[in-house]
């Protein structure tokens, strides 16, 4: 079974530029998550989708970050404009169902973003 | 509010030694899940174990074992006879039934196994 796919793996941009990350979850997984992991810290949830609806985006900096999951499968996370403090690894995860805390999340390899 | 504390920032052991990684959590929920993930240098978070709050039975999987104690709010992870391939950052995480399955991670413990 294929795991969670993410691209690109690495991205370097200058501040105030925009960037987009793509995630394809495990086939059949209804729930998709985006996490931000700053160096030396644990991942922090940015947004959770169930199918194509948003469950939780309370930690998403909506003035510059946006995310969508239009057909309930793959998802895109965008940052516009980027700031230096956005340098981090962006991890995508998916879980099988929509039954809340009963689900294990499986993670992709992440996209490492460096903002100069 | 929920919180996960991994007090050990870095640990180094010599190959074949046993090592225990500590995890202490805080939650107001009576129903929650605890997880351990491994993050090797490649960056991907690898799921190791999930334990629900009603199951305090310890678990062993090969060289890995987990000790869950609700009385001390701890969920510790032991690697027996460590190997170089065990070198990674290990994260403990908490998911609450009221939290929409969101994972709250500790800051991680970097384990280095020296050959």
Image: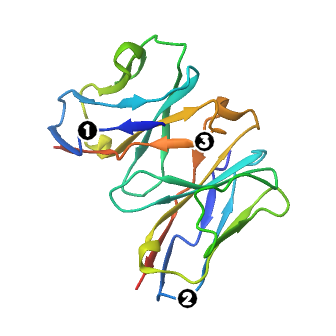
Reading the image, the residue beneath label 2 is: A17
Picture quarter with the C terminus of chain B: top left
In the rendered image, which residue does mark 3 sit on? A105
Residue occupying image coordinates x 37% and y 21%? B65
The crowd level at tag 3 (other Cα within 10 Å; few <14, some 14-19, many 20+) is many
Side (left or right) of B41 relative to A28: left
Residue toward you, B81 or A26: A26
Do dots 2 and 3 share one subunit? yes
Binning the other alpha carbons within 10 Å of mark 2 as few (below 14), some (14 to 19) or many (20 upward) gives few
Residue B42's spot in the image, x, y percent? 41, 58
Determine whether, in the image, residue B36 is placed left or right of residue A29: left
Total numbered labels placed on residues in the image: 3
Image height of A82 relative to B80, above or below: below
Dot 1 falls on which chain? B
Residue A70 picture quarter: bottom right
Q: In the displayed image of the protein, which residue is found farthest to the right? A: A71
Q: Nearer the viewer, mark 2 or mark 3?
A: 2
Q: Residues within 10 Å of mark 1 (few under 14, many from 20)?
A: some
């Amino acid at each position: 079974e294929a795991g969670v796919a993410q691209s690109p793996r690495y991205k370097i941009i200058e501040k105030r530029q925009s960037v987009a990350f793509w995630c394809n979850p495990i086939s059949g997984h209804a729930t998709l998550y985006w996490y931000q992991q700053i160096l030396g810290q644990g991942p922090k949830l940015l947004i959770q989708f169930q199918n194509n609806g948003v469950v939780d985006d309370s930690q998403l900096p909506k003035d510059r970050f946006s995310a969508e999951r239009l057909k309930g499968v793959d998802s895109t996370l965008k940052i516009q404009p980027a700031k230096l403090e956005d340098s981090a690894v962006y991890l995508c995860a998916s879980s099988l169902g929509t039954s809340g805390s009963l689900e294990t999340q499986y993670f992709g390899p992440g996209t490492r973003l460096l903002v100069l | 509010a929920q919180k996960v504390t991994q007090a050990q920032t870095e640990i180094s052991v010599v190959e074949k030694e046993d090592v225990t990684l500590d995890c202490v959590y805080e939650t107001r929920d009576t129903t929650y899940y605890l997880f351990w993930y491994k993050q090797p240098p490649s960056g991907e978070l690898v799921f190791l174990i999930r334990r629900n709050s009603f199951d305090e039975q310890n678990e062993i999987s090969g060289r890995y074992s987990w000790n869950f104690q609700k009385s001390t709010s701890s969920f510790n992870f032991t690697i027996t006879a460590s190997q170089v391939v065990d070198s990674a950052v290990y994260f403990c995480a908490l998911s609450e039934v009221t939290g929409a399955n969101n994972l709250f991670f500790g800051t991680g413990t970097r384990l280095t196994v020296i050959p």
